[in-house]
């Protein structure tokens, strides 16, 4: 019995995923729940376990391809027989052929007048004839061990709606060229109307702003291109010796998000300095005891989170989001913590930090960071942040001016903690100091609020009274 | 002009029609001396006397049967079902006889069957029903389900003056909860015409009765998010005003149907079919429904609350549709 392997939905608002790696080859045996392939989505990267035991018979979606959720990406033959991998049975062949026919119908340019039935039939027949892949020769996909051939660009089925298809026909617009902004990349009414308004009806897609040179490789696939512009003519980047690597999906997402954030939020930066000599002493004293008692390493992060939460509660504007002309004030303090990964960056979120005690915060941080590095975060664990903290100090940075993680309106940057000479009661003293930076969205957070917020955070850090055990 | 409740508007319609036309009579349980379980018929007995305001035993079958007989004799009876749930007792008479009389024998039955319907008042499974769809499926009947005091009065007058049988559903949750100024002059509202209660460009909400108000509230909230919902109030379910529905769908390209009736076999399915047949190439998203769950109306207040569709349900569906 064959089992379809589908692209899972990794969270409520996720509509597509990219297969980054197949962990099994066609013909290989796989156990139920054994990792079968790796995916990358808007939110997380994850290993997907096999839905059944058997032999991976066919890979329908190859590495690097992005497909909507619920798409069949492969087939597992539950019988486990070796013969299954030798020849592809008829149904497997039938499916793609049918799909291709349907796609062609969608793409057929609209004739001036409605075609008669026989005309339409003829058009279909000739199209089928012209398509070598539709010839009924068995395709031994599994036997060769090769992944399914990637679809020709432009033949992917465009997700749209009856209205959009009618408008496309009436205005002679090629839907494959219209960037979709609807759910799951769907071409919506808004998208096609904006193309129609832009006047380039027959051209459809806004032409890229650069002439594509023949020599350099084309930009790798993915929707990122719509956001990530090229600042200078591309020719000027390719000179001398170079190598070109496509961005990983995560890299693209980060790039998109950063460009978007800088475009959407007017960033302002404030810098403050806190004397954390007391905290450093406290940590040195309690480090071992803390670890013995709780099994968790004691770090500085929970101190800063506690301080930030105090600041957020005193100045709720810093804990908000901007929706057009509305300000969404979040009652929860969900603190995103930037975690550096070898392959990028992810921001897991400590939910309801205002309800957690010191130990709870420390445990949550350790757990999230560990699972972030093991690619084991759940989608909801990187969502619904209301404020974020990043720690360039961990790499020795004196201070950093971070980019706001949307839809937050502020992000706190922590510099490295180091001993510095400071003036204390007209004497020069050696104190453990840290630079605190706040990047904030000036649409809603003014300097006055930001500095008061920072004052609160600083005061809390410098006058720590809470017990940590 | 005083603010008038929906209940008072209905009472005025009956009162004024009985004043206007001596052939109009009312018949039902406790409608005379007691003035009706909800006091819709209060004061009628004193004004029009026992010959025109007839109290009956507890037998809905007898009420409808007698009303049919009266209508054959030239009267225009308004039959009250104390709770519309019990109209089921008269299912055979209404669907097999009342609805077909004009067709089969050329004998129109100019009668109105009216009563309180709907949930939200903790009436439990036998006093909260929305049985409109049994009758919407019956050719030969007209089915009205108003949402405002103005419409209730104007449509009831149209129903009383109509030469064929009309079912008139009165949502009891709205009886005393909505008020508006009514014209003092005689007016009617045409049967079979829906009305656009709120203009919008992003999606259409087709609804009626109590859910009309829920939908309007949701639409106001959606507007704050930049989603402009058009709200179409059906007012009459049979005949259905397809023209107004299609017009709105062609304008907004998205359709959400909201009703308090249960989901399976509710009018949302019919409206979805109308939209597919008449505006398929104007649809920019799936047709969604917000309805009560497929269950009898629970008695327990928290369960009833869960059972009935509410503003948040409408908001969630509308948001989903808007972002589609």
Image (cartoon, coloured by chain):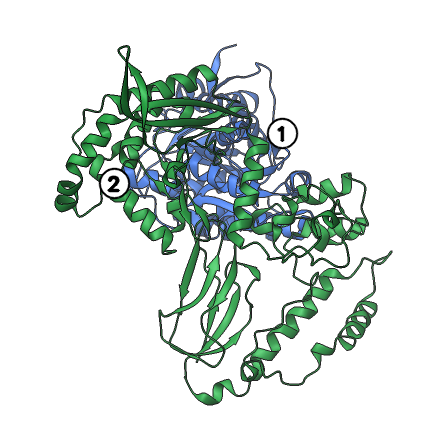
Chain colours: A green, B blue
Q: Residues within 10 Å of mark 2 (few under 14, many from 20)?
A: many
Q: Chain of mark 2?
A: A
Q: Position of residue B262 (x, y in %)?
A: 43, 47
Which numbered circle lies on residue A362?
A: 2
| Kind of element beneath mark 2 | helix
Q: Is residue A277 above or below residue B274?
A: above
Q: Position of residue B309 (x, y in %)?
A: 42, 40
Q: Position of residue A116 (x, y in %)?
A: 83, 65
The answer for how far apart the CA atoms under marks 2 and 1 are is 53 Å
Residue at 56% from the left image edge and 48% from the top image edge: A183
Please indicate, yes or no, whether residue B52 appears anywhere in the rendered image: no
Quadrant position of residue B306: top left
Quadrant position of residue A424: top left
Judged left or right of residue B75, residue A234 is right
Q: Nearer the viewer, mark 2 or mark 1?
A: 2
Q: Position of residue A99 (x, y in %)?
A: 64, 69
Residue toward you, A368 or B268:
A368
| Kind of element beneath mark 1 | loop
Residue hosting label 1? B199
Judged left or right of residue B44, residue A18 is right
Please indicate, yes or no, whether residue A319 appears anywhere in the rendered image: yes
Which numbered circle lies on residue A233?
A: none
């Amino acid at each position: 019995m064959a089992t379809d392997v589908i692209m899972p939905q990794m969270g409520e608002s996720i509509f597509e995923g990219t297969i980054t790696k197949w962990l099994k080859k066609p013909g290989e045996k796989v156990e139920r729940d054994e990792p079968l392939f790796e995916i990358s989505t808007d939110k997380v990267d994850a290993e997907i376990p096999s839905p059944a035991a058997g032999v991976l018979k066919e890979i329908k979606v190859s590495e690097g391809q992005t497909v909507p959720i619920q798409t069949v990406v492969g087939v597992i033959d539950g019988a486990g027989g070796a013969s299954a991998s030798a020849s592809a049975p008829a149904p497997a062949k039938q499916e793609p052929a049918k799909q291709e026919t349907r796609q062609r119908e969608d793409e057929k340019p609209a004739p001036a007048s409605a075609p008669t039935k026989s005309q339409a039939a003829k058009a279909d027949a000739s199209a089928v004839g012209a398509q070598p892949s539709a010839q009924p020769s068995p395709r031994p996909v599994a036997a060769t061990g090769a992944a399914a051939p990637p679809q020709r660009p432009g033949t992917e089925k465009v997700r749209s709606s009856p209205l959009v298809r009618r408008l496309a026909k009436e205005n002679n617009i090629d839907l494959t060229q219209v960037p979709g902004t609807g759910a799951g990349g769907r071409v919506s009414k808004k998208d096609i109307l904006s193309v129609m308004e832009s006047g380039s009806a027959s051209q459809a897609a806004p032409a890229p702003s650069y002439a594509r040179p023949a020599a350099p490789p084309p930009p790798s696939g993915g929707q990122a291109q719509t956001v990530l512009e090229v600042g200078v003519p591309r020719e000027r980047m390719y000179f001398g010796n170079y190598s070109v690597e496509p961005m990983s999906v995560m890299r693209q997402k980060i790039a998109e998000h950063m460009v978007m954030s800088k475009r959407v939020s007017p960033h302002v930066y404030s810098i403050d300095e806190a004397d954390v000599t007391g905290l450093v002493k406290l940590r040195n004293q309690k480090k071992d005891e803390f670890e013995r008692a709780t099994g968790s390493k004691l770090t500085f992060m929970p101190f800063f989170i506690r301080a930030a939460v105090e600041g957020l509660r005193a100045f709720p504007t810093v804990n908000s989001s901007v929706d057009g002309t509305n300000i969404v004030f979040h009652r929860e303090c969900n603190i995103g913590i930037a975690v550096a990964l070898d392959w990028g960056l992810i921001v897991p979120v400590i939910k309801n930090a205002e309800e957690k005690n010191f130990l709870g915060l420390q445990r949550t941080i350790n757990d999230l960071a560990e699972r972030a590095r093991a690619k084991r975060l759940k989608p909801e664990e990187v969502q619904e942040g209301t404020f974020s903290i990043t720690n360039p100090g961990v790499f020795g940075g004196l201070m950093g001016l971070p980019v706001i993680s949307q839809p937050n309106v502020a992000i706190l940057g922590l510099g490295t903690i180091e001993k510095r000479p400071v003036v204390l009661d007209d004497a020069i003293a050696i104190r453990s100091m840290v630079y605190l930076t706040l990047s904030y969205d000036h649409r809603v957070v003014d300097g006055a609020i930001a500095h008061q917020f920072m004052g609160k955070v600083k005061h809390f850090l410098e006058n720590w009274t809470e017990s940590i055990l | 002009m005083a603010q008038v409740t929906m209940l008072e508007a209905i009472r005025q319609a009956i009162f004024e029609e009985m004043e206007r036309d001596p052939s109009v009579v009312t018949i039902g349980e406790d409608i005379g001396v007691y003035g009706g379980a909800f006091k819709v018929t209060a004061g009628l007995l004193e004004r029009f006397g026992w010959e025109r305001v007839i109290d009956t035993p507890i037998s809905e079958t007898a009420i409808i049967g007698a009303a049919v007989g009266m209508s054959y004799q030239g009267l225009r009876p308004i039959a009250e079902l104390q709770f519309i749930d019990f109209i089921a007792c008269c299912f055979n008479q209404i669907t097999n006889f009342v609805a077909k009389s004009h067709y089969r024998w050329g004998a129109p039955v100019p009668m109105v069957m009216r009563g309180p319907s709907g949930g939200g008042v903790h009436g439990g499974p036998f006093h909260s029903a929305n049985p409109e769809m049994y009758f919407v499926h019956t050719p030969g009947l007209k089915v009205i389900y108003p949402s405002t005091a103005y419409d209730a009065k104007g449509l009831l007058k149209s129903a009383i003056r109509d030469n064929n049988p009309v079912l008139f559903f009165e949502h009891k949750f709205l009886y005393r909860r909505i008020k508006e100024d009514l014209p003092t002059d005689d007016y009617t509202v045409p049967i079979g015409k829906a009305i656009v209660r709120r203009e919008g460009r992003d999606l259409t909400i087709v609804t009626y009765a109590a859910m009309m108000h829920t939908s309007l509230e949701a639409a106001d909230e959606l507007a704050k998010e930049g989603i402009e919902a058009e709200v179409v109030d059906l007012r009459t379910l049979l005949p259905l005003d397809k023209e107004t529905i299609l017009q709105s769908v062609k304008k907004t390209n998205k359709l959400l149907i909201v009703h308090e009736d249960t989901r399976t076999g509710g009018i949302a399915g019919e409206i979805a079919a109308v939209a597919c047949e008449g505006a398929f190439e104007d649809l920019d998203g799936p047709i969604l429904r917000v309805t009560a769950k497929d269950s009898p109306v629970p008695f327990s207040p928290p369960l009833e609350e869960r059972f009935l569709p509410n503003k948040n349900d409408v908001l969630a569906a509308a948001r989903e549709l808007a972002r589609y």
